């Protein structure tokens, strides 16, 4: 009798403890990347978990942010995209600007911006509610995430190691995303897996 | 002059507006839906202390940002987004600049994000080193300043600004006062001890410092800013708890593995009692700092629920207390008393093992109760506001003299000069005979008394911890310390197998007993020497005469003639001898006399002013706190500090060596000890030289309490 009571009390305590644990939304490098589903700007359904077996890059963007302009105006982001997608990496550009905020665009505008930028993301997703942004705790534009074939987050942070908005600083900077992809390619653990993202704050809907 | 300067500033401002390039990507970025953007949101101004320079000069330059209302620029760690201000100098050959000195930032929330930066106006400071040879004529230094300025949107701005020195055509300029004002807004480097660790989903930062006073300061006014990113979730509000000399921040952890942040500079800003914002900076390291926070209730807190949790801190302190107590058994003043007690126990145990056990318990009770009594007195005095610490009782010459008397009497007894018999006291008698529970109890009291001067290495940490605790935690720690001291004897009294290991009692014990009198005499001698520093020559002579009187009194007591009248006479004479010994005790307390310590072989006398002054220089500083009655201090000084090789290191490195003497009561030294969580001497603190660029000293190093030359010399390197 006593032992049954004890088991019950213990179970109740464990349950309470689990309830008390905070929901930790921010993704952790080395852990599975949080899954999400969305409709892209071409109306196609997107699901991250469907991409198991492929490497994925997530890029938070806002075409009016000077730091995004630094990397698109110079052609650096496009070159990074091309280098990645040429190797079969799925590149997902995400806009989490809320309606009325800087960078908020309709699907039509988003398509013409991609064209203007001569960019080549595999998928572009509009996230005006900020749901995906908050899921990844995306803070800046650009804010980059690299996911390996098993769906594990292997890199989170800045595009490179020079946080200046000056495009002149791209030359000579280390591109963390390409470095992470190279490490994955070579079967090495990702050497630099977590850096401080820099850029404009994501213009979430308030 | 004033007019000329105003004109100059006006011209400079106009110039800065004209040469300002508004953004690298103005075409697309400035078409914000909310803003019809003017040209610039930040105007920059460069000011040097003066407009002349000489070879070898170090010149302070201020880079002022005047920021448009509602906009902000960033600190060196910008927080969740943004980018720090960058300054790139173009200068003639040989000129060098130091790091940017950043005033304490503010938290700038933006939606779910929080950034660290500045609004309205901020002055960054940089030092420029002038080489030994400079070109003749005007010298121009040019700075390219890149600023990211954000409101809802971000605009990068950059401009190029120049300072011209040694221009014969220019009026002399003096902006030293303006720069000094800007310097006041920089965080003040402080030698605080800080560490951080992850606790579940939170990062806990514990900071201990010198005499941090929280009078009139609300915990809500505290903010902390780590220089390293990812230590905390910038947007989550911290819980701030203020303890005596300690601040504890708890904030949601950041998204970076803490192992990647072995240490970081931290800026803490707070609103002082004059409602002004102040800031300090210090280095914090990853780890679990020794802290009052685990057990003490905060004096103030931002969280409404005050948590009193007893965890690792107290368990560790109890363990140290037990070890410290055990080690006390080996101290020269305690060992003789105990070894004789132990040998006599063997004899007693053969007759009556049950009685031996009781005697062990009585002894333990004596030790533990004495420790609790001393601790109780200490806590009561502390609560009454007295600036005292462990060993405080030894700051009183009366206590020292009484201890000297006591050890001398024990010594006399051991040599066999007298045997106390019958009605006269039971202390010394039972000490050697080993029977009588009261005797065992008082042996315990005696052991505590003679152990007091021997602050063993482990004891100081435990006692320092204990005294920062409320009484209900402090008293158990002292009790455990006493228990540690009593434990070997207690174990012996309960374990016949241990008793068998000891040599058989016999005639040799008498010889051994006499031999053990010499450590006692030596200890008495040492106490008299301590006394010589606490009293004047007359006082010293009085005590020495008192010792002779004691010897006479006991000798007399041991010679009781057959004749009743003669016996009475002897007893009266003995009583007179004892009375005069008592009358000769020093009853006057002496204040600490700093002049005395100046006879030290090297070093300077410690005072808070002297320390502050020394820390202002660029020399390293070494502080030693010692006391005449502290054997550990004396041994450390002799074997590890006052030796040729260490003195050479002191001289080579230009180390300022400050010595504080706690032999007598000294509140300033007590404060210093408290600020390092200690309540006793010795303590050795090394302040490394300041970084030549930032002017910030590394975190002060506390050396162990037992020193070797290697430990000292390594710490100084």
Image (cartoon, grey):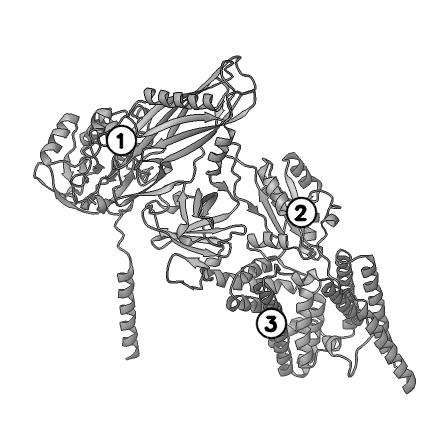
Q: On the same chain: label 3 and label 1?
A: no
Chain name for mark 2: B
Q: Secondary structure at mark 3?
A: helix
Q: Of residues B346 and B444, which is closer to you in this image? A: B444
Q: Secondary structure at mark 2?
A: strand
Q: Please rate how many residues cluster around mark 3, counting C-alpha atoms within 10 Å: few if below 14, some from 14 to 19, many from 20.
A: many
The residue pinned by badge 1 equals: A67
Where does label 3 land, which residue? B368
For label 2, the residue is: B659
Tell me which residue sits at (62%, 46%) in the image.
Answer: B623
Residue A44 to residue B15: above or below: below
Quick check: A54 left or right of B373?
A: left
On the question of residue B410 being in view, the answer is yes
Quadrant where the C terminus of chain A is found in the figure: top left
Quick check: B534 left or right of A30? right
Residue, far left: A43
Rendered location of residue A187, percent (x, y) = 28, 37
Q: Mark 1 — on which chain does it sit?
A: A
Instruction: Indicate the position of residue B257 as horizontal and vertical percent values.
Output: 36, 46
Q: Nearer the viewer, mark 3 or mark 1?
A: 1
Q: Residues within 10 Å of mark 2 (few under 14, many from 20)?
A: many
Of residues B70 and B496, the one nearer the viewer is: B70
Which chain does tag 3 point to? B
Residues at circles 2 and 3 in contact by the CB criterion of under 8 Å: no
Horizontal arrangement in the rendering, residue B607 relative to residue A139 (left or right): right
Q: In the rendering, at what x and y percent does residue B293 appear?
A: 46, 58
Vertical comparison of B130 with A143: above or below: above
């Amino acid at each position: 009798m006593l032992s049954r009571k004890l088991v019950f009390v213990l179970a109740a305590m464990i349950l309470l403890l689990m309830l008390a644990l905070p929901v930790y939304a921010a993704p952790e490098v080395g852990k599975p990347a949080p899954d999400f589903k969305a409709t892209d700007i071409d109306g196609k359904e997107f699901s991250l978990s469907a991409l198991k077996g492929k490497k994925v890059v997530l890029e938070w963007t806002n075409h009016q942010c000077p730091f995004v302009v630094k990397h698109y105006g110079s052609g650096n982001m496009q070159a990074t995209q091309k280098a990645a997608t040429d190797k079969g990496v799925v590149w997902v550009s995400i806009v989490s600007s809320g309606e009325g905020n800087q960078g908020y665009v309709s699907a039509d505008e988003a398509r013409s911006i991609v064209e203007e930028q001569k960019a080549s993301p595999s998928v572009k997703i509009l996230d005006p509610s900020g749901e995906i942004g908050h899921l990844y705790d995306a803070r800046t534009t650009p804010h980059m995430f690299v996911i390996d074939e098993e769906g594990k987050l292997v890199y989170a942070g800045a595009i490179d190691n020079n946080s200046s908005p000056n495009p002149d600083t791209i030359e000579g900077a280390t591109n963390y995303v390409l470095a992470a992809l190279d490490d994955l390619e070579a079967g090495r653990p990702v050497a630099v897996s977590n850096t401080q993202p820099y850029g404009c704050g994501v213009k979430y809907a308030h | 002059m004033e007019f000329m300067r105003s004109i100059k500033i006006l011209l400079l401002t106009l110039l800065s507006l004209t040469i300002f390039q508004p953004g690298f990507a103005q075409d697309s970025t400035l078409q914000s839906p909310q803003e019809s953007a003017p040209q610039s949101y930040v105007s920059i101004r460069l000011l040097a202390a003066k407009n002349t320079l000489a070879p070898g000069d170090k010149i302070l330059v201020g880079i002022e940002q005047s920021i448009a209302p509602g906009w902000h620029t960033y600190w060196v760690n910008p927080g969740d987004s943004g980018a720090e201000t960058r300054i790139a100098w173009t200068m003639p050959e040989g000129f060098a600049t130091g790091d940017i000195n950043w005033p304490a930032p503010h938290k700038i929330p933006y939606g779910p994000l929080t950034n660290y930066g500045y609004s309205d106006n901020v002055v960054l400071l940089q030092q420029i080193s002038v080489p030994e040879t400079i070109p003749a004529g005007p010298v121009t230094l040019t700075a390219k300043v890149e600023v990211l300025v954000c409101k809802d949107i971000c605009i990068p701005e950059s401009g190029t600004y120049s300072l011209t020195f040694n221009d014969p055509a220019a009026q002399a300029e003096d902006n030293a006062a303006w720069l000094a004002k800007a310097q006041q807004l920089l965080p003040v480097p402080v030698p605080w001890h800080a560490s951080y660790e992850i606790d579940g989903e939170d990062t806990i930062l514990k900071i201990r410092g010198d005499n941090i006073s929280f009078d009139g300061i609300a915990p809500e006014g505290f903010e902390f800013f780590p220089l390293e990113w990812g230590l905390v979730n910038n947007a989550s509000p911290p819980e701030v708890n203020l303890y005596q000399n300690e601040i504890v921040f708890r904030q949601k952890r950041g998204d970076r593995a803490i192992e990647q942040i072995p240490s970081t500079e931290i800026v803490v800003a707070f609103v002082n009692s004059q409602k002004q914002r102040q800031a300090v900076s210090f280095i914090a390291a990853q780890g679990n700092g020794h802290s009052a926070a685990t057990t003490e209730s905060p004096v103030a807190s931002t969280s409404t629920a005050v948590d009193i949790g007893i965890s690792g801190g107290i368990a560790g302190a109890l363990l140290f207390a037990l070890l410290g107590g055990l080690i006390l058994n080996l101290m020269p003043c305690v060992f003789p008393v105990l070894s004789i007690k132990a040998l006599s126990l063997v004899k007693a145990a053969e007759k009556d093992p049950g009685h031996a056990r009781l005697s062990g318990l009585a002894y333990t009770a004596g030790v533990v109760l004495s420790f609790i009594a001393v601790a109780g007195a200490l806590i009561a005095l502390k609560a009454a506001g007295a600036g005292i610490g462990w060993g405080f009782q030894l700051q009183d010459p009366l206590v020292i003299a009484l201890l000297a008397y006591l050890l001398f009497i024990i010594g006399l007894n051991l040599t066999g000069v007298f045997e106390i018999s019958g009605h006269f006291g039971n202390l010394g008698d039972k000490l050697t005979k080993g029977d009588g529970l009261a005797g065992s109890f008082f042996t315990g009291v005696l052991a505590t008394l003679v152990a007091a001067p021997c602050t063993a290495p482990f004891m100081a940490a435990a006692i320092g911890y204990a005294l920062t605790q409320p009484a209900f935690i402090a008293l158990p720690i002292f009790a455990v310390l006493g228990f540690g001291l009593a434990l070997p004897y207690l174990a012996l009294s309960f374990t016949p197998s241990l008793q068998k290991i000891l040599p058989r009692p016999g005639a040799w014990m008498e010889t051994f007993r006499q031999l053990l009198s010499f450590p006692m005499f030596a200890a008495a001698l040492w106490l008299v020497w301590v006394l010589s520093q606490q009293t004047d020559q007359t006082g010293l002579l009085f005590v020495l005469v008192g010792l002779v009187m004691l010897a006479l009194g006991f000798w007399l007591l041991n010679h009781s003639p057959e004749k009743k009248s003669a016996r009475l006479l002897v007893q009266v004479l003995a009583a007179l001898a004892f009375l005069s010994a008592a009358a000769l005790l020093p009853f006057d307390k002496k204040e600490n006399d700093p002049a005395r310590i100046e006879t030290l072989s090297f070093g300077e006398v410690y005072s808070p002013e002297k320390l502050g002054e020394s820390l202002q220089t660029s020399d390293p500083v070494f502080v030693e706190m010692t006391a005449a009655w502290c054997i550990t201090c004396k041994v450390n000084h002799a074997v590890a500090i006052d030796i040729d090789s260490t003195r050479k290191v002191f001289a080579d490195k230009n180390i300022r060596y400050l010595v504080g003497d706690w032999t007598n009561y000294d509140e300033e030294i007590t404060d210093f000890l408290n600020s390092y969580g200690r309540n006793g001497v010795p303590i050795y603190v090394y302040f490394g030289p300041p970084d030549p660029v930032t002017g910030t000293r590394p975190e002060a190093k506390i050396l162990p309490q037992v020193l070797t030359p290697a430990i000292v010399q390594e710490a100084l390197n």
